[in-house]
Image (spheres, rainbow, N blue to C red):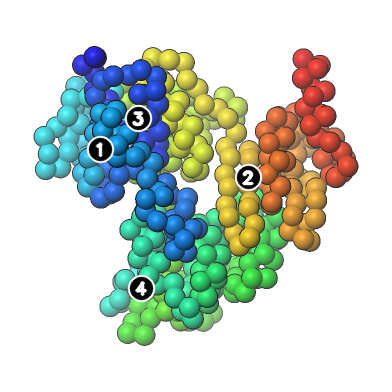
Amino acid sequence: MTDRTFVTVGAGQTAAVAARTLRRRGFDGRIILIGDEPHPPYQRPPLSKEFLSGAGAPDDLWILPEKWCADNSIEIRTGAEVTHVDATTGTVEIAGQAPIRADAVLFATGGRPRRLPVPGPRPELVHYLRTLDDARRLGRTLTPGCRIGIIGAGFIGLEIASTAVGLGVSVTVLEAAAIPLGTVLGPRVGTEIVRLHRGNGVGLHTGVAVEGVRTDADGVVVNTGAQDLRFDAVVIGIGITPNTDVAAASGLAVDDGIVVDAMGRASVPNIYAAGDVARRFSDRAGRHLRVEHFDNANRQGAAVANAMLGRDAVNDDAPWFWSDQYEHNLQLLGAATGDAVIRGDIEGFEFTAFYVDTDDTLCGVFTVDRGEDVMVGRELLGRRIPRAALQDQDSDLWELVDAEEVAQ
């Protein structure tokens, strides 16, 4: 058995996948996951969906079963705060606990919600959704007839809206942009997202600049400049800030995330970063990228674990993301840049948007209830595809994949 010790700062999806990968690759040294939440590693995507609706249980969220951790000697320290990592000695300092000497350290610290100042006597009426405890608190608020305001029409805000409507809640969404998700999905698809939510009874207001939020004895008041809107509770979903404070204080290069190379190696030897907090160099994109998706956390966690073992392990796959809203499954692969070529029934909300640049190179794929198009799109990304073929329902896109494989 090796006497090496690997430590993760953070105990979420990325850290859990890294620990599992290390054991599967034969590492038999000490593995310690240190997280500041009171829970072992759990999945975050269900928090705004089935768990928030009451259909899911905490036991469905756990990533590493307790018995597996015991059988594989995985140490998980919950409710523990890492205060500093000595890059020279590998010493991990933990508030109120003895320091740990590590041979390699993985920063998987994720991010925290961006917050707004909310004066007033009832701060408990203002919610953010990032953690299991956040979801529990919000879930207790979502009762039939309750009036909920959601500030921010990103994926999280819209998933909460969808879940809340299903629980009989009156939902109003306030979005600063003219078109929700317009920068992510483009204006045409973003407009369809608006139609979806308004069609399900959500009061979705765009181009709204929230100037202030306050609580009083009767609830929450949101000031838009033009008027005051009153709600029983408010959810703020305006993105996250990467948790880089400890990394920066420990001497790592930080720039809207911990800067790492293609293999997840930070600017200091034997220190790595992965997941939401990592700004990793992508050969595919030709620049550093920080991706805040579940699939990326999984893939980077596995890749960095291999890198920690000295293996060549570059994960440069196109980012993939999914969202469940009402009865629909939405998926996004790659980058939604360029023109959106529509395939399918956009009026019936069962369609695919293929995003192509000026020379017809496929950059991204967005689907609604058409998961197979994501599968074929993964094979076609980066290739020049005739727009007519992408749009024509009778055109078999797999034939384009087969033709390319034969040509090679």
Q: Earlier in the sequence, mark 4 or mark 1?
A: 1
Report if residue 380 is visible in the image.
yes
Secondary element at tag 2: strand
Q: CA distance from mark 2 to mark 3?
A: 28 Å
What label sits on residue 398 in the rendered view?
Answer: none
327 with respect to 343 (left or right): left
Q: Quadrant of the C terminus?
A: top right
Q: Secondary structure at mark 1?
A: strand
- How many C-alpha atoms fall within 10 Å of the one at disc 3: few (<14), some, or many (≥20)? many
Label 2 crowd bin: few (<14), some (14–19), many (20+), radius 10 Å:
many
The residue positioned 47% from the left and 74% from the top of the image is 148
Residue assigned mark 4: 125
Q: Which mark is residue 332?
A: 2
Q: Is residue 274 above or below residue 188?
A: above
Q: Is residue 122 above or below residue 84?
A: below
Mark sitting earlier along the chain (2/3): 3
* Above or below for 406 versus 168: above
**Circle 4 or circle 3, nearest the eye:** 3
